Image: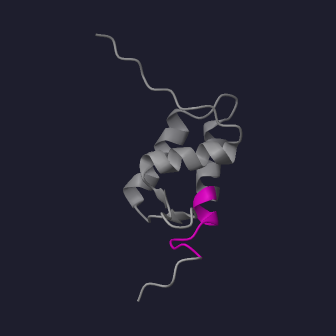
Amino acid sequence: MLMAKAQRSAIRTLRGWAISVLQEAGAIRECEFHGWIEDRADPYARQHAVAVARDDPPHGVSPDEAIAEIREVLDSIGDACPECPPKD
């Protein structure tokens, strides 16, 4: 039986693509209560997302631009949901 590689759904922006790659790699997650994106601080997942950006950037985007967008998204989010109470 032939297996086809699953294609990612069409993403309209480079930022949206980066968020999708980071979620697939497990580098970020969504707050289950409020929907905010949270950084998981997993260095292996981050490395995997950067590898995907380098090896399979979106059409018309250079690998350097894709990696820069991955890093920009990671730099723009925190590790906790701003609406959840602080964990002590």
Q: Which image quarter: residue 27? A: bottom left
Q: Residue 8 appears at what percent x and percent y?
A: 53, 32
Where's the N terminus, which quadrant? Answer: top left
Q: Give the range drawn in magenta.
A: 73-82
Q: Which of 85 and 1 is in front in this view?
A: 85
Q: Which colouring convention does the figure follow?
A: one colour
Count how many numbered circles sit on residues in the image.
Answer: 0
Residue at 61%, 42% (x, y): give it. 17
Q: Decide whether residue 1 is among the magenta residues.
A: no
Q: Position of residue 55 (x, y in %)?
A: 51, 34
**Residue at the spot 63% in from the left edge and 31% down from the top edge:** 10
Predominant secondary structure, magenta span: loop
| Quadrant of the frame with the C terminus | bottom left
Q: Is residue 4 left or right of residue 31?
A: left
Q: Is residue 77 above or below residue 46?
A: below
The answer to whether residue 53 is above or below residue 83 is above
Q: Residue at x 40, y 18 (%)?
A: 4
In this view, the residue in front, 59 or 81, is 81
Counting from the top left corner in percent of width and height, residue 15 is at 67, 48
As for residue 76 lying within the magenta part, the answer is: yes
Q: Which residue is drawn at 59% across and 56% down?
A: 71
User: Can you name the residue that lies furthest to the bottom here?
Assistant: 88
